[in-house]
Image (tube, rainbow, N blue to C red):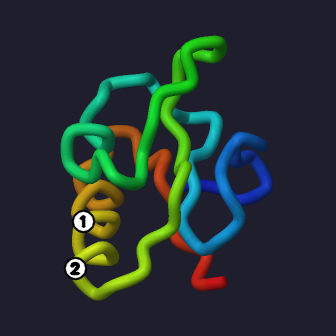
Amino acid sequence: MADKTHKWPVNVAGKYYVDEQCIDCDLCRETAPAFFARNDDGSHSYVFKQPETPADVEQCEEALSNCPVEAIGNDGE
């Protein structure tokens, strides 16, 4: 499970984030490309935009549930 105390600082503020467990597999970026991007310097994904609509949330939740290392979190804030 993702840990918000270990989330990457490049994540934008909001309830979704990627933490240090990310293995740069690209799944979240393929599932929800409007919200997840790759940090080329650190070889990991991060959230660059928070979802705004129910369809956006659905994409982010799909990325969260499919993450092979559970590096995506939703802290509800």
The residue that mark 1 highlights is 59
The reply, left or right, for residue 1 in relation to residue 3 is left
In the depicted structure, whether residue 19 falls above or below residue 62: above
Say which residue appears at 45% left-offset and 36% top-offset: 37
Label 2, residues with CA under 10 Å away: few <14, some 14-19, many ≥20 = few
Q: Are marks 2 and 1 in contact (CB under 8 Å)?
A: yes
Q: Is residue 4 left or right of residue 50?
A: right
User: For mark 1, does the 10 Å Cα neighbourhood hold few (<14), some (14 to 19), or many (20 or more) residues?
Assistant: some
x, y percentage for residue 53?
33, 85
Q: For this rendering, which residue is in front, 77 or 68?
A: 77
Image point (57%, 24%), residue name: 39
Kindly identify the amino acid type of the residue bearing the numbered disc 1. Answer: Gln
53 is higher (above) or lower (below) than 62: below
Residue type for callout 2:
Ala
Mark 1 lies on a secondary structure that is: helix
The quarter of the displayed image where residue 12 is located: bottom right
Q: Quadrant of residue 62?
A: bottom left
Q: Secondary structure at mark 2?
A: helix
Residue 41, horizontal then vertical, whole percent: 64, 12
Residue 2: % across, % down: 56, 55
Query: Relative to residue 31, is residue 63 drawn left or right?
Result: right
Locate residue 42: give its quadrant: top right
Quadrant of the frame with the C terminus: bottom right
Q: CA distance from mark 2 to mark 1?
A: 6 Å
Q: Which residue is mark 2?
A: 55
